[in-house]
Image (tube, rainbow, N blue to C red):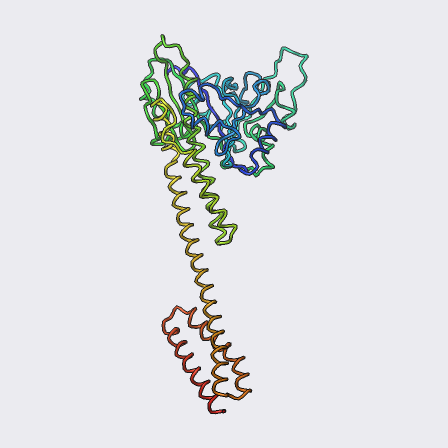
Amino acid sequence: MNKIKSQNSRFLYLFFIDRNCLNQAVDALTKNLDWEIIEKPYGLYSDEMLYRIRNFLFSNKQDNSCYYLKFKKQTANKWFKKTLDDQKQRFIATLNQQAGIELFLSHYGVGILSITLTNKNPSDFDQLKQFNYLLSQAKGKLTPRLLIPYPSDNPKLPPAPAEDAPLSERLGKYGCIFDLVELRKYLLQPLNSFGFRQIQRQFSVYSVIHFDNGVDLTELKPLLSALSHVEEQQHPGSIEVNHQRMNACHLAGVSSLGAAQLTTEQNSAQQFDRALQVLNKYFIAYLTALMQRLILQRLIDDAAYIVRKQGTTTKSRQQLQNLHNNILGFKVTGYFTEISHREAINQYYQLCQTGLRIPTSLQTVQDTLHHIDINNDAEFQQGISTKLEWLQILFIVFSAVEVSSTIAEKLNFTAEYAATSTILLPIIAGIISYLGLTSEDPKWKLGSISAGILGFLGWLGLGIWLK
């Protein structure tokens, strides 16, 4: 068996919030829980990245950017007490000290919660898969319960908290039992008042598996595929996944649900932590593409809302204009052809965009917006046409009144006939013109014109006969 040195996995929870209340939402997070806004991101997050990426992900209050928050390390470490045992003893986990618990909140109204855990006893390939698959689940019995072991050699410790006690009373206590679904709900609870809406129940997973040197990564493509698709141990295995050989010591794969990185030791004389580099620096490329995907999903939702309205009111036209502005802002400040000075990171970013179908999603948004514009233009033109038809009818009615009055006066029609004509002629003229202008049938149009002429001649002849 290839020697597995480490497994680190970021469990990513994706959601929407009200973009108009983002600042208030951040205030609620920092006031009610131990979230803190990070003004300067960790070095590996920003090293070798273009300034536009830093603005997109870490500019906090700047428009079209993200708030970057991190849960205080002291509190998080107290919660996890160094190690967590799966109750069924399938793995032992600990909170990754460098990444910890993070939150990215975009001004477009999308958010990503990241909880990074380290597998303390990676034994074989099946166990690697189970670690990611089980912890990503939100399906009741499939979701593993985590336990902070209760030391049996310290009788002075208080008793373990009840399993059904509120999570805030259990966290950080020896004997505490909880799961990641409970934890994410607790961490994001302040957002419930700000239009919080989950996108998927299951966590997405970004994982890095590090092997000893001498391992041939090309033989591990089935493992890469399984980890990228977040498959369980017994899964028959997906045929393929978007992947790329970054170098002799790095194989990467990306799917719609997760991303996996397989790395090996490089030259022993080269002093750097390859697994840490990939876990954090390459994560920014994946995070950028994932954030783009969520923003595009949000824009598609906005477009769908406008379509459901099916109207050309001032409000709907303003919403459409706002959508145009948001798409333009995204294309200028959030959609990049490259993100780094390093070609390897740019190539991985392109792999992430392909695996998460970003170009296709953008094209869908643009096509949808184009068709909405065409539909609204057609509705607007139809509305203008209808108003013009009514104006024409009113003009014909007014003309009928004027013409009949003038003729009756010039030809000295009887007073009774002239008065009756003033009342009846506008009504008859209005009905005939309405039938002619609103009908699509040419025969009806010709018939209405003929009826109008014959009616006028009949009225004129009757007036002369009565005189």
- Can I make out residue 90 in this image? no
Rendering quarter of residue 158: top right
Expressed as whole percent of the image width and height from the top left, the position of residue 416 reads 55, 87
Q: Is residue 46 visible in the rendered structure shown here?
A: yes
Report x, y in % for residue 124.
41, 19
Q: Quadrant of residue 122?
A: top left
| Side of 254 relative to 14 (left or right) | left
Residue drawn at x 56%, y 19% as measured from the top left:
73
Q: Position of residue 315 (x, y in %)?
A: 52, 50
Pinpoint residue 208: horizontal percent, then vertical percent: 42, 21
Q: Is residue 187 above or below residue 120?
A: below
Q: Which residue occupies 40% across, 12% down?
A: 272
Of residue 326 and residue 109, the one placed in the foreground of this image is 326
Quadrant of the drawing holding the N terminus: top left
Report how many numbered discs are placed on residues in the image: 0
Query: Residue placed farthest to the front in the image?
Result: 410
Question: Does 301 sit above or below residue 380?
Answer: above
Considering depth in this image, is 260 or 397 the residue closer to the camera?
A: 397
Q: Decide which of 274, 68 is in the foreground and name it.
A: 68
